[in-house]
Image (cartoon, grey):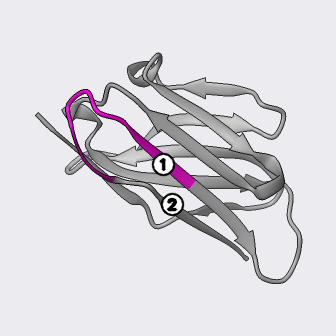
Amino acid sequence: QVQVVESGGGLVQTGGSLRLSCAASASRSEFSIDAMDWYRQAPGKQREFVATISSTGIINYVDSVKGRFTISRANAKNTMFLQMNNLEPEDTAVYYCRVRTAMYTYWGQGTQVTVSS
């Protein structure tokens, strides 16, 4: 079982920045992560993909965050970050980290990001 914990959410004004973190750990055995992703879910909407980074550094973003968000990863520490700049009210959502291994997918509990206008 892999535990996934997000942190770094909060309340910011339009144009502000936040840096989210995601840490994956396992209590009993080592594990190898294939990719780590960020998703978000706004009130009343479906969860949507935001960004992904593979173990080899391949990165993709949803169009709405390109140029504003930057995903990065510290492989040795099974940790991922999402630097979010120039935030907009439309970015308000619960942000979730997803960890993909060869056999399973794990989700965190989410961290709230609120952008005030």
- Residue 52 in the image: state x and y as whole percent: 62, 36
Q: Residue at x 81, y 60 (%)?
A: 103
Q: Indicate the amino acid at tag 1.
A: Leu
- Residue 111 in the image: state x and y as whole percent: 39, 59
- Does any portion of residue 44 appear in the rendered image? yes
Given contact means CB atoms under 8 Å apart, are the residues at marks 1 and 2 in contact? yes
Q: Residue at x 21, y 51 (%)?
A: 43
Q: Residue at x 66, y 55 (%)?
A: 99
Q: Residues within 10 Å of mark 2 (few under 14, many from 20)?
A: many
Query: 19 or 54: which is nearer to us?
Result: 19
**The quadrant where residue 37 appears:** top right
Q: Is residue 48 above or below residue 5?
A: above
Q: Which residue is mark 2?
A: 6
Q: Can residue 19 be found in the magenta stretch?
A: yes
Q: Which residues are magenta?
A: 10-21
Query: 9 or 106: which is nearer to us?
Result: 9
- Residue 94 in the image: state x and y as whole percent: 34, 53
Q: Which residue is mark 1?
A: 20
